[in-house]
Amino acid sequence: QDIIDFQYRVWQKSGLSDNATYLPKSVHPKFCGNNPKTDMDSAAAECRMAVCGAVEGLFKKTGLRPKDIDILVTTCSVYCPTPSMASMVVNAFGMRKDVQAYHLGGMGCANGVVGINMVADLLKAHPNSNALFVTNETTTPAFYKGRDKHRLVTNVLFRMGGAAVLLTNKRALIPRAKYALQHRVRVHCGASNEAYKCIWYGPDAEGLNGIYLGLDVVKEASKGLTYAMMRVGRYVLTWGQIGQWLWTEAQRRLLGRKDVAPYSPCFGDCINHFLIHAGGAKVLDGIGKNLKITESHLWPSRTVLRYYGNVSSSTTWYTLAAVESLRGVRKGDKVLQIGVGSGIKVGVNVWK
């Protein structure tokens, strides 16, 4: 009963709805009762449902065929089968034999943003190409059956889902493109033991696997985000904000003014829309405070968290859909995409 009460308390503060998020039948109490299935066959069924559904939807919306895809990159952190998830997509849709297919595993929630680095680099190496980027976190093998409270939190937060994104450098498709990738920044804090160990997947004392979340996750994620925003700031801050930062640094470093606080810009003054990884209510609170943005900037991410839960690497893409549907994006708007995950890894992409 203590474990049930603990999970209920976590859920009350999580920001998730009690009836709108999605779990696969393998771990959904309505279908499996108290005997969740975490075997590979159940995981494969969940993965195929989410991933193939997302990819099929992309082909219907774009009018492209599977044969039009030159590069395929898939990502899922815990579930890493053989053949890979990328191979599953190639098989399911009958893609070409010369498709450049890659799968990224073990990279956590940040990889929906960080993975864009690899896609962009592949497009640089392959001119006149279409790249399909597929994000997913299969919840079946990540479901924890034990009693360690650090691992039980993920059972409450994580839900099934997936997203498929098409990126291209074909000139003929430029008029149809919705966004242009302007800047991409990646930060990895894994050299720090505190950052490296605050999120990890593995067995508890009884040998039961689960995703461990340390008490310092928000603290370490905030550090990584600070590094990333310092690097991306030069590209997005206004001249007035850059001038204020230079003046503050001059007082602190050249004049020795220790009473002058470090300059912390309000990114809401230079960015129109924020796609923030909805890892949980506390994660959103911490990122919002770090960026000095208002609740109006956070509500798309909170909406995704409420109705879909933490869908890991797909979360920021769900948030983009929420922004487009509920608020609308105008020509020339700047969109900041932020992903935070195990490692600690942080990815920041700027779209226009």
Image (tube, grey):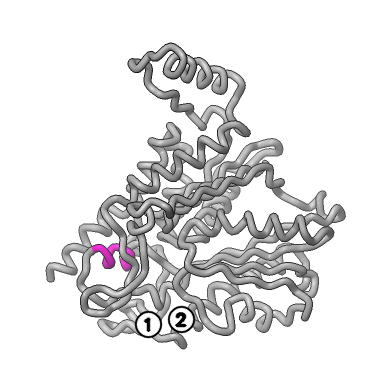
> What residue lies at 36% left-to-right and 42% top-to-bottom?
285
Q: Amino acid at mark 1?
A: Thr
**Residue lying farthest to the top in this orientation:** 255
- Residue numbers of the magenta segment: 150-155
Mark 2 crowd level (few <14, some 14–19, many ≥20, 10 Å Cα): many
Vertical order, 4 against 243 (above or below): below
The quadrant of the picture occupied by the C terminus is top right
In the picture, the disc for residue 43 is: 2
- Residue at x-position 57% and y-position 64%: 163
- Mark 1 — residue? 38
Residue 287's tag is: none
Three-letter amino acid code of the residue under disc 2: Ala
Query: Is 151 one of the magenta-colored residues?
Result: yes
Does dot 1 land on a helix, a strand or a loop? Answer: loop
> Is the residue marked by circle 1 packed among few (<14), some (14-19), or many (20+) residues within 10 Å?
some
**Which residue is the extreme one toward the right?**
172
Of 349 and 228, which appears nearest the observer? 228
User: What predominant SS class does the magenta segment belong to?
Assistant: helix
Camera-side residue: 156 or 345?
Answer: 345
- If you read the primary sequence from the N terminus, does the residue marked by circle 1 or circle 2 appear first? 1
Q: CA distance from mark 1 to mark 2?
A: 7 Å
Q: Based on the displayed image, in which of its 4 quarters is residue 252 positioned?
A: top left
Task: List x then y, in percent, for residue 295.
Answer: 42, 37
